[in-house]
Amino acid sequence: MANSLQDQLMKSGLASKQDARAAKSEKRKKQKQKKKKGTIIVTELDKQVEQAKLDKLEKDKLLNKDLQDKAAQKADMAKVIQMIKQHGLKDGMGELVFNFTFGSTVKKLYVDERTRDALISGRLGICVLGEEFYMLADETVRRLCVIDENVVAYMYDRNAEEAEPEMAEDDPYAEYQIPDDLMW
């Protein structure tokens, strides 16, 4: 039985004694170089292995980031649902109709006079969860808007009124005021 791979190759005729001596001397030279200079000789295979490790590490980082993003989105949605369920009031509390646009359709909520005034003045806003509309305090609606602006169905913006451009001087209806509580 042969002791080493080198002996096995020589017995099978795939390698000669000269090839074995050359391989030993090459191995010795590399070891001396390592000891003398303290440098490591990097082979092509080592470079490929290192590159494969770096590629795998980068791929794992991207996959982990995707998983973290999905978990964060799921947590944000759970937070939105909890805030709406906890702080929201459903419609059907009054006889007055409050109309607002949601997307491209006009929706209506039945509210009492106090609630309608709060919606008009901006103290309350309307959020949607699934197919149901909830009325929430303006602070809560603004926090929800930061998390996910798609859940906010209606919020009166007080700053938008101040930012409106001045009316043209030749406007024939300039002296008539538009009522805030206009019913449609």
Image: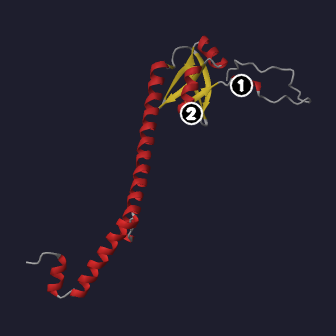
Left or right: residue 39 compared with residue 111: left
Can you tell which quarter of the image residue 86 is in? top left
**Which quadrant is home to the N terminus?**
bottom left
Q: Nearer the viewer, residue 171 or 67?
A: 67
- Return the x and y of residue 169 as percentages of the image width and height: 91, 29
Figure label count: 2
The amino acid type, in three-letter code, at marker 1 is Asn
Residue underneath mark 1: 159
Identify which residue is drawn at 74% across, 25% down. 161
- The residue that appears at 81% across and 19% down in the rendered structure is 177
Judge by depth and name the residue closer to the eye, 82 or 156.
Answer: 82
> Please, which colouring scheme is shown?
secondary structure
Q: Is residue 98 left or right of residue 29?
A: right
Q: Quadrant of residue 54?
A: bottom left
Name the residue at the right extreme.
170
Q: Position of residue 20 (x, y in %)?
A: 23, 82
Name of the residue lying farthest toward the top: 114
Q: Residue at x 18, y 88 (%)?
A: 13
Task: Look at mark 2 in the image and give the residue it sits on.
Answer: 149
> In the structure shown, which secondary structural element does the residue marked by tag 2 occupy?
helix
Image vertical order of residue 79 relative to residue 93, above or below: below
Badge 1 density bin: few <14, some 14–19, many ≥20, Cα 10 Å: few
